[in-house]
Image: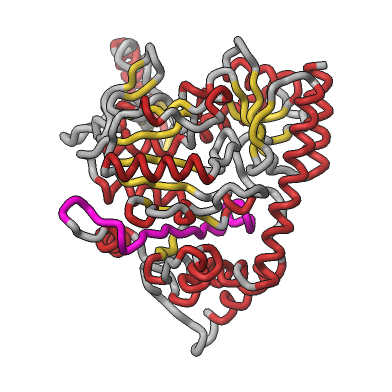
Amino acid sequence: MAAIQQSLSTSISSSISTFLGQNKLRFRNQNVSMPGKTSGIVRCVATPSTEKTSYKTQVSRNENLAKLQAGYLFPEIARRRSAHMLKHPDAQIISLGIGDTTEPIPEVITSAMAKRAHELSTLNGYSGYGAEQGEKQLRASIASTYYANVGLEEDEIFVSDGAKSDISRLQVLFGSNVSMAVQDPSYPAYVDSSVIMGQTGQFQKDVEKYGNIAYMRCTPENGFFPDLSSVPRTDIIFFCSPNNPTGSAASREQLTKLVQFAKDNGSILVYDSAYAMYICDDSPKSIFEIPGAKEVAIEVSSFSKYAGFTGVRLGWTAIPKALLYSDGFPVAKDFNRIVCTSFNGASNIAQAGGLACLSPDGFKAMMDVVGYYKENTQIIMDTFNSLGYKVYGGKNAPYVWVHFPGRSSWEVFSEILEKTHVVTTPGSGFGPGGEGFVRVSAFGHRENVIEACRRFKELYK
């Protein structure tokens, strides 16, 4: 019996060797395992090829997304920062680029959120879905705190998860068959959301602009306020004051001209006031301070840069009842429909925090946070002024807009990152009008801002 088994094993092994030799090419790219004898039988197991054919659906890609150029600005900066960290693992990276707050949320605000969170664990304190437009008490508090002197009421306030989200909801409201104008440079979400909605033409590489968008150039020469006589009529006008990235706040006279321009053209003005609490002169903090604005304007704002809510997410949009479409239908009613369809309301915990922000102690705490960042801004401005650079913004905003004449913004960004390990933001990322500038954010711990400025002086002395 033993002799028969031995003969059988030898015969099988010989057959396998012959088989593998004859099929050498076939198995060249396959993993072949021969685990040996099991009960006198040798098994040959071939794993399948790792090459797979990709399955594709029959759904076409949204052609508007294909128009977008590269990645959204701030994730691209984060990607370059990550690559730099891999290259320089021991470097102390300081971020003064993406406008993310760094200081702790005041305790008077977090304690209110903690209390609300705990109440959710009790039978009497639990709440589920809330009003899509926001809790009545918070809407009333926003109206009385920011709009009491202009007569806006609580039912004209829509609480949200932040101004950026509301910008996209407004774009859904307007639809694809509208034209738009935007400050140049400006916050990139205005342009990118317009592209995604299909409001624009293709990107024109020779001028770094999208077709069917009116770029309102804002430069040091015109005081960062566009020459409205050269701006064509558009349906929608996006305008941010204080402006991100230039840090410039429009004056009352300038905003009066802007409101009249919108009226003369039958346009809707979307006014972003996310940095209004940084204003320290007599520049208007709300577009509704301008007579006639209720008939042409929408205002979006946020708690992000006042209370450190960049992660908590809470903002609002104000739409007056007086704002009507060409057929007389109220804009606010359509926006309410958009909100009710696409949004279940801001977090009830976040809204408790928002209510605490607007209490007397909470408001003072927010102003203290704003004051801290404004001190950072002054340090950055003093640094670049001492180095002989032209510096803009800073006074009414947490951003310093530094001019590097004759140089590419991305080139300067890369130079600063490579030689100082400090992250800034290239001005061209905000539009063609930002070429040659770099935005430096004041959002940072004081010791980091001081250290970054020391490095700037070493690089550019």
Q: Is residue 335 visible?
A: no
398 horizontally vs 455: left or right: left
Q: Nearer the viewer, residue 316 or 145?
A: 145
Q: Position of residue 110 (x, y in %)?
A: 66, 68
Decide: is 384 above or below 321: above
Q: Quadrant of residue 45?
A: top left
- At x 57%, y 54%, the residue is 304
How are the residues colored?
A: secondary structure
Pick the residue in front: 28 or 273: 273
The residue at 36%/68% (across/down) is 132
Specify whether residue 450 is in view. Answer: yes
Is residue 2 left or right of 26 when viewed as pictured? Answer: right
Taking depth in this image into account, of 311 and 47 the one nearest to the observer is 311
Check if residue 325 falls in the magenta segment: yes
Q: Quadrant of residue 217?
A: top left
Asked whether, in this view, residue 318 is left or right of residue 15, the answer is: right
- In the image, residue 230 lies in the stretch drawn in magenta: no
The image shows residue 324, relative to residue 32, as above or below, that is: below
**Residue positioned 32% across, 33% down in the render:** 195
Q: Position of residue 192 (x, y in %)?
A: 38, 35
- Which residues make up the magenta segment? 305-327
Q: State the quadrant of the C terminus.
A: top right
Identify which residue is drawn at 33% across, 24% down.
Answer: 210
The location of residue 270, given as percent across then percent down, is 39, 47
Q: Position of residue 308 (x, y in %)?
A: 63, 55
**Image label count:** 0
Look at the magenta stretch and give its main secondary structure: loop
Q: Is residue 238 left or right of residue 421?
A: left
Above or below residue 1? Residue 144 is below
